[in-house]
Image: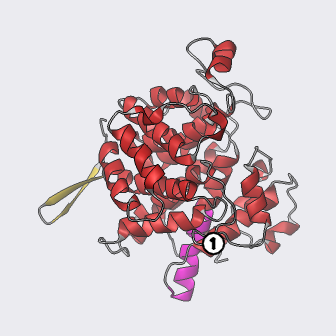
Amino acid sequence: MEQKNQKVKRSGDKIFNVRCLPEYYSGCLLGGAVADALGASVEGLNLTEIHELYGTDGLRDYTENFGRKGAVTACTQLALFTAEGVLRAKVKAEESSTSLAIVAPVYNAYQRWLATQDGICDATLFKGFGGGHLIRWPELYHDRHAEPCCLDALSDGRLGQPGSPINDNRGCGAAVRMAPLGLFYCSESIFRALDPKTADDTVFTTACQLAALTHGHPDAFLTAACQALLIFRLIRGDELYDAVQNTLAVLVQHPRHEPCRSRLEEVMTGAHGTAMPDNQNHMTASHVLAQAIRCALDANGDFSRGVLAAVNMGGPSAGRGALVGQLLGACLGRGSIPKSWLLQLELYDLITEISLDLFVGFEPSGNWLHKYPAW
């Protein structure tokens, strides 16, 4: 894929091409949201049903969904709250002079998201849920078909973890919300504190923990960790093929990795790993990610081509599309996304703002601390 305006960093005799620029951060989150909105219109349909509705070329543009064009699903909502959680974790670490601890702040952020799902934007909630930025956005107070496992897990009162699963869900929803974690760890203020020898494993392990809050099956939380690490590797300079290979090297160090590893290895060798299973609506997360990677590789640097291929495959179109949109947006930058899709995208301003905040990582200003209080 052609890369534009990349910053180059040198370390000794090595040259690292880096996409750690606002254009690629916003490209990742906006790309995922655009594809999520496109896929929502055909979510759960099979290929025959898509062709009956939109012809043999399939869906090519937004259609009205949730009462408007460009409406996002709960996948994008939860990605935003993941971003808020990690940013607030950094504030907490700075204020208390402690090491970065991400799981509890992100869980609290998901509780704030859960409070929005009754559709009532009540100012009395703000203080009770720790204030902050996102809970003040009325546009987020919409039920957008969240996975029942997310609602149930976050209402349970327990924190699901990889070693203590809260359920056996193996869907792709957790993977879609992990891109902000990969972006966060690439921020210079965060990245410089990482040990280069263990940075990949830190991203991967943290993503497992965040995903397991709602998705207890290893296929789900390991796949989510793969997506977080893919975004991390892409922003730090890998091309997509290399990012997958580097992610596989980390994946195989974790228990019960075999199904996820097998599907990712198949897609990288061009084998049959991306074929649709008989029941499209019950695909596991690793199957969806494998399909997303295949669509991104086949796109040959064309954002629209990759995303439209993903959403028109049938089954979990919004989730698969969002994964492809995040990958291609991180590779190609915001400029690769058609302007017509961006102009109609719900929450465009907020997603852009959050992506730039992830790029900054932390700022010791009053406005920043008002947006991201340590809670």
Q: Nearer the viewer, residue 74 or 345?
A: 74
At a point 48% along the width and 66% down the height, the residue shown is 361
Q: Quadrant for the N terminus, please.
A: top left
Q: Nearer the viewer, residue 341 or 185?
A: 185
For mark 1, what is the residue? 164
124 vs 293: above or below:
below
- Residue 303: x, y in percent? 45, 32
193 vs 181: above or below:
below
At a point 33% along the width and 75% down the height, the residue shown is 195
- Residue 223: x, y in percent? 50, 53
2 drawn magenta: no
- Residue 240: x, y in percent? 34, 44
362 vs 51: above or below:
below
Q: Residue furthest bottom?
A: 97
- Dot 1 falls on a residue whose secondary structure is loop
Q: Residue type at mark 1?
A: Ser
**Crowd class of label 1 (few under 14; some 14 to 19; many from 20; radius 10 Å):** few
Q: Quadrant for the C terminus, please.
A: bottom right
Tally the marks.
Answer: 1
Residue 326 seen: yes
Q: Nearer the viewer, residue 282 or 65?
A: 282
Name the chief secondary structure element in magenta.
helix
Q: Is residue 94 left or right of residue 39?
A: left
What's drawn in magenta, residue-wise? 83-98
